[in-house]
Image (cartoon, helix red, strand yellow):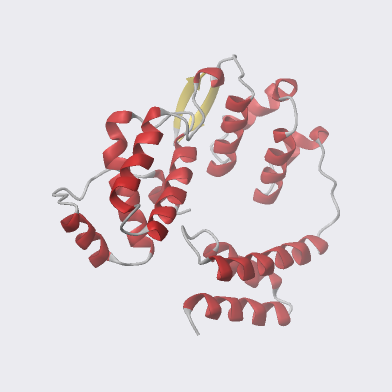
Amino acid sequence: MDYYEEIAAQAKALMDAGDFDAAFALLDVELKMPYIPKQQEEVLVAYYNRCRMERNAQKPIRRASLDQLEDLLNGSLDEQFQAVELLRGANVRMHMEVLRDALCREKLHYLVRAYLVEILISQQLHEEITMVHEGLEVTFIPAFVEAPMESDGALMVIEQLKEWLENEDPSFLAMCVEAFIKEAYLQLPFNIEETEAFEIALAIVAYVYRAYDDHAGFEAFCETHRILSKGSYALLLDKHEI
């Protein structure tokens, strides 16, 4: 039995025992890993969705609507993500007061904050927005911020990762690209700078090797590509352990 089969078996045993909270917590941790083989991922996601439904069935029924946007953004993580989904199909200009308040709250989940900024960018808002980003207050105009994966710096990171890994290890490349996309979202409203592209690409490779506790693999990678410095770029991924 491999690692993911063992995780699936543990989750199923917890579910069979009726402990959906424990099974959900176990699966939530595993599904945040940068890469899971497709077949095993499908099983874990199916179990995760069942746990989520069972847990929600035990809670009072609450139909989310835009009228509840402020409460949702101040609620649990699940409720905050409900707010994000509602806003994806709404005109954010009609809800700016609530959004401004939410973005200035340090306790707003970092992924929720990133997705809200992405929505503002996608709707080309020309108003100044002030928000808390990594403990600092920043002001920006969403219409002047590029989408996370469209900036020149982000494209340079992807090209660097491809140069290193596309022929050597396409599966590892896919893991690195997925991890980088998360990093790019976490950096919003800032875009990836071209001058930092190489260091970020190297940091992403190191991050994925660490996720598998393969320090020797990273050392071998640096030797293969004649990279003398192991880099010192601090990823937000490391800070938030996504």
Q: Nearer the viewer, residue 230 or 177?
A: 177
Confirm whether residue 109 shows in the render. no
* Rendered view: 180 above or below 149: below
Please give left or right for residue 187 compared with residue 223 in the image.
right
Task: Indicate left or right for 123 with 205 as reference.
Answer: right
Which of 236/205 is in front? 205
- Residue 202 lies, in percent from the top left, at 28, 47
Instruction: Report the label total.
Output: 0
Note whether residue 238 is visible: yes
| Residue 133 against residue 60 in the figure, above or below | above
Compared with residue 3, is residue 129 higher up or lower down, i.e. above or below? above
Residue at image x 53%, y 42%? 110
- From the viewer's perspective, is 8 left or right of 173? right
Q: Position of residue 141 (x, y in %)?
A: 53, 18
Q: Residue at x 70, y 25 (%)?
A: 92
Residue farthest toward the bottom in the current orientation of the protein: 1
Relative height, residue 127 to residue 52 (above, below): above
- Residue 85 placement (x, y as % from top left): 71, 41
Query: At 44% across and 54% down in the image, what residue appears?
Result: 174
The residue depicted at 35 percent of the width and 40 percent of the height is 159
